[in-house]
Structures are given as structure tokens and as C-alpha cells.
Image (cartoon, coloured by chain):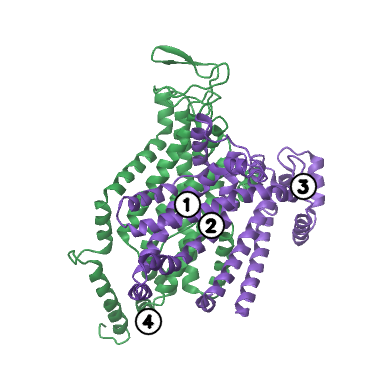
Amino acid sequence: MALDPLIMPGSATREAEVIPAEAEFNAGYTPAIGPWKLALRRLRRNKVALTFLVLFVLIVVVCLLAPVYASDVAHIGPNVGNITGTVNVGGKVKDIVTPQGLPIGPTWTNQYFFGADQEGRDVAVRLLYGGRTSLEIGAGATLIIIVLGTLSGLLAGYFRGWVDAILRPLMELIWSFPPVILGVAVGTALALGGIGPIKGNSLIIPILIIGVIYVPYLGKPIRGEVLRLREQDFVDAARAQGMGPWRIMVSEILPNAASTIIVFVPMMLAYAILLEAYLSFLGAGVQPPNASWGSLISDGIQLIDTTPHLSLIPGAMLVLTVLSINIVGDGVRDALDPRAQVRIKT
Amino acid sequence: MARFIVRRTLSAIALIIAVSIVVFGIFEIIPSYNPARAIAGRAASQTTVNEVARKFGFNRSLPVQYATTMKLIFTGQVIDYQYDLNVVDQFRQRFGATLSLVIPAGILWLLASIVLGSISALRVGRVIDRALMIFAIVGVSIPIFLLAAVLLYLLAFKTNVFPNTGYVGISDPIQWAYHLVLPWFCIAVLSVGFYSRVLRSNLLDMVNQDFVRTARAKGLPPRQVFTRHVLRNSLMPIITMFGLDFATLLGGAALVTEAVFNIPGVGQYEAQAIGNLDVPPILVGAMFTGFFVVLFGAFADIMYALLDPRIRLTG
């Protein structure tokens, strides 16, 4: 079997191709370590990226614990207002909202830790719930981007021909709209009427919109990568062994494109969370009663001269989250060191 | 060359038709939703809805609906339902303010990137180079509207260094610039970090090219080698990126910046329409922005092909 002339050339070239590249790649290390393990090692040595990874995980955990915070610490729900109430701050009783309509600033105590908004709602509770919404939308949209982007890139790049002739113009079409404009157009259209059984204020709508908008941003580079990979000798070898197109795509091409996809995951998560913030800021993202960091900033911005905490605190959380994702993403890219140039535009 | 131009123009036209169909589709053929009610707005009366349905031909077949909608847009007969204003007229009147915002902001953005990118490439590994890297990653993590809000709070409300929002026409250039400095800065600053990083890596790649060694060998002073040979050849990718980003700037950054700084441009009109879920301005705005991006892309491709013959073969 090993001497079969039909198999030998292919596998021989594959070996010959991989070994020099890997030797260079592994320079200075013991040769037995695989590229994935090496990447992980490099990432572990990147202290800055690790710090921000911990920060990001912390933010996610705290936001997921929003209901616990609301019920056990603040004792108030995210949409419960208390305009006429008072709060005890260090022994002094203060109005939550003054008779002039000015909400209280940060109290740094269990109740109204970050102050109240003009309807007497607890900003800290709303911040955590809003963060949960932002992160859920970001994660859901990223999942859609990765699945659809990888699939469309694989199909268009591998089959070329008519499959490519359908998928490529579709991607080009989405690509020709600025993401905010397309998101706003679809967002307002769906917020009015919902789609099928999904209501207009469901979180699924922004997830779908953001997911679909960014599909070409992954699909196009994956397509290019697959176009390059499919001409490689190891794919010829697999074909010569009688593998069908689907098996070649899954077991030969996909693993080789994996590092590109992984590099895109944090990048897409950051872009999805930012786009959600833009859309919600403009009123085309999450719809009331849901709130996200973007809509909290938007609600607070009219009152920025009197009560800056309303917009600046969710703003700071948003920036901290996106920044940590970007720094971790940078670390991952450096660790995997893919040759492909990775860049997307806003 | 002529063949390339014809081919690129035809594909741009096809893309423009596709863009218009997509925008039409977004608002009018989404299942389980009444397009007439959507266009008439959330609080419209039944008579308004019937009026809209008749005007846009929603009781007719889809191709007729599409043709009617396009005709209404291009003959400027679309009316918004919040203020009862003609949408296309509004766009025309407000376009000047938007250009006052984005053109100087774009120039500032490009110039600052070139200067900072060059300094960073000439001082690899030094403080400014590292600072720029942090600046770049922070820049892509901050939404423009948030930066705008923070600057407005610190520099206009707290310290009164700059006017708190508003817009003055260009006929009074000093007040015009004074009112627009903060918005320009907001749009430019977030992209400068990223752009200078890209320019920096292009410059560093270019320094090792043969023609640069030749230029140095023939005795050109280092400054001339840098500006005439290295920098000039490194600018192309930056300008390409800028072309694409500038087109999207009109549809994204301008929208939120105008809304926060209260600049009476197209973006502010759009932002108000979105807040009220007033569909006609959003529909027309999305369509025009899509057209603009496609035309801008085609124009840029043709310009590159004129400048660089290699592109004609691959494009």
C-alpha cells in the first residue's frame, strides 16, 4: 500500500512541503512540539494579553451575575424606578431624584452604587443587565459570522464556478454598505414589525442583523485562503486517494484555515459589540424595555452636562470590554503568526 | 485600458441596481409586515397608511412597486412623516454641513497618520513607536459617539474651551472652524493610530527594497531618499484604505458625530429619523450611501488602473 505509486508522490510532496517550513517555524525549540502547542506557549508568555483576558472574563462573569446583584445586593430590578424614594448614604438620607429632577450620583454603597437615572432606576443594576445584553448580542452575532463566513468562504473557494458566482456578488453587495447604515436600515424595518414569529424588540433581531452584516468580512478572506489551499499538493493527494469534496473541505482544508478563523473570532466579537453600541445609540439596535451599553450611553447623553455618570459609566465599561478583547485578539494573532494579512474596516 | 474601464463601470452599475433592490427589499418585502404602515410611521392614521399604499403602489406587483419607489426617490417626491418635509430637498440642503464636517476631518486624519507613521518608522522601538501602538489599539476600541460625549463634557461644559455644540456656516470661517474643531478631532483621532501603524509597516518593508539602496548609493541625501522614494511608494495602500473608509465615514461616523454635536447635516437628519422610526429618510439615505460607496470604489479602481498598469491585468 505504501508503495502504491498513486499515493506516494502526493504524500511525499506533502512531507517535503511541511518539513522545511516547520523547521524554520520551530527554530530554537524542541522539534517535537506541534504548532498549536507552540502558539499556546507564546500566548502564555504574553503577560499583557493574559491580564486583559482575565479582565474580560471578569467582566463577563460579573455581567452574567446581574440578576444576583439585583436581587441580593441592590434589591431592585433593572426596570424598576423609584422617583420619590430616598436612600441612606453614610447616615444621611438623600433623595434618589431631587424635586428638580436631578438623579443622585454614585453613592458607593449597596444601593445606587453608581447612582440613579432620571427615573430613579439603579444605574449599577442597569449597567450589568445592559452589559449582559451587549455581550449576548456580541457572542450570538460572532457565532453567526464564524459559521456563515467559514461556510460561504469554504464553498465559494473550493467549488468556484457557479457557487462562487452566487456567493461572491452576495458578499460584495453586503460589503458595499457601511455597516452602520445597513444595520440602521434593517434594524428600523424589523423593529417596527418584527420578522415572522420574532417580535420587534427581541434580541434575536440585532444578533441576526450584526451577524449577517459582518459575514463577508470573514467570508472574503477565508475564500481567498481556500482558493490558495485547494491548489496545494496535499489536496491533490487527498483527491487522488478518492476523498470526496466534502471530506476534503472538512478534514484537509478546514484545519489549515483554522488559524485564520481563530484570529478573526476576537476581532469579530469586538466589532459586533461596537456595532451593537452604534445601532443602539441611534435607536436601531435593542428596543425598550431591553437596554444595552449603547442604549444606556444614548439615554444619558442628553443630560451629560448635569449627570455625566449616566453615559460615562456604561461608556467606560464598553471601552474596557472592547479594548480587552482587542488586546487578547492581538496576542492570539501574534501567537499564531499567520502569514495572511488580517484587517477589516469599520 | 478601455476594456477595464468598461468592465468596471458595468459591474458598478450592476452593483448599484442590486443595492437599490436590497434597500427596497429591506423595507418592503419583509414577510409579515405591512410596508405602507412602516413607511407611514409608528403612529400613522389609517388614512395616511392608505395614502402611502396608493402612492408607492403596494397593492400592485413587486416589480411595479420597485419601479414606483425608485421613481418617487429620483424625482424627489418622498416625504418624511415626522416633519412632513421633502426628503431629497432635506438631503440637498444639509449636504454642505456634512461636507464641512467630513472633508477637513479626512484631511486631518490622513496628514496626522502620515506624520505619525513616518516618525514611528524612523524611530522603531522608541517611546513614540510604542505609544503609537497603544494609541492604535485604544482607537479601534472606542466608539466615536462616546469620545464625542466625553470631549463635549470636558471641553465644552466643564471648561468652556469650545462651544457646546452647534454649527456656523462657512461664510464666517473662524467661527465655522471653531465650532467644528472638536467634531473633526473626534472623527480623525480614532483612526490615526491604526493608519500610522499600517504606514509604519509599509515604510519598514520599503526601506529594504533595491531601489532605495540605489537611491542611497547614488548619493541622495537621506531626507530625499525618505520623502521621494520610501514614503511615496508606501502611501498607496494607505490611500486605498482611506478611500474605502472615507466612503463609509459618510454613512457611519458622520451620523453619530452630527447627532452628538448637533450639526445640521444629513447625518443628523438621518439620526433623528432613526430615533422616530421614520422610514423614508432612512430608505433614501441607505440607498444614496450605497450608491456613493459603489461609485467611489469604481472611481478609485479606475484611477489606480490608470496609475498602475499591473492592476489592469488582475482586476
For this rendering, which residue is in front, B275 or A292?
Answer: B275
CA distance separating discs 3 and 2? 29 Å
Say what secondary structure mark 3 lies in: loop
Q: Chain of mark 3?
A: B
Return the disc, 1 or 3, that comes first in the chain's sequence.
3
| Nearer to us: label 4 or label 2 | 2
For this rendering, which residue is in front, A91 or A100?
Answer: A100
Query: Do discs 4 and 2 belong to a common subunit?
Result: no
User: Please, what is the three-letter code of the amino acid marked with disc 1?
Assistant: Ser
For this rendering, which residue is in front, B257 or B294?
Answer: B257
Residue that numbered label 4 is attached to: A240
Residue that numbered label 2 is attached to: B245
CA distance separating discs 1 and 3? 35 Å
User: Please, what is the three-letter code of the amino acid marked with disc 4?
Assistant: Ala
User: Please, what is the three-letter code of the amino acid marked with disc 2?
Assistant: Asp
Q: Neighbour class for label 4 at 10 Å: few (<14), some, many (≥20)?
A: few
Residue that numbered label 1 is attached to: B191
- Is residue A141 in view? yes
Q: Colour of chain B?
A: purple
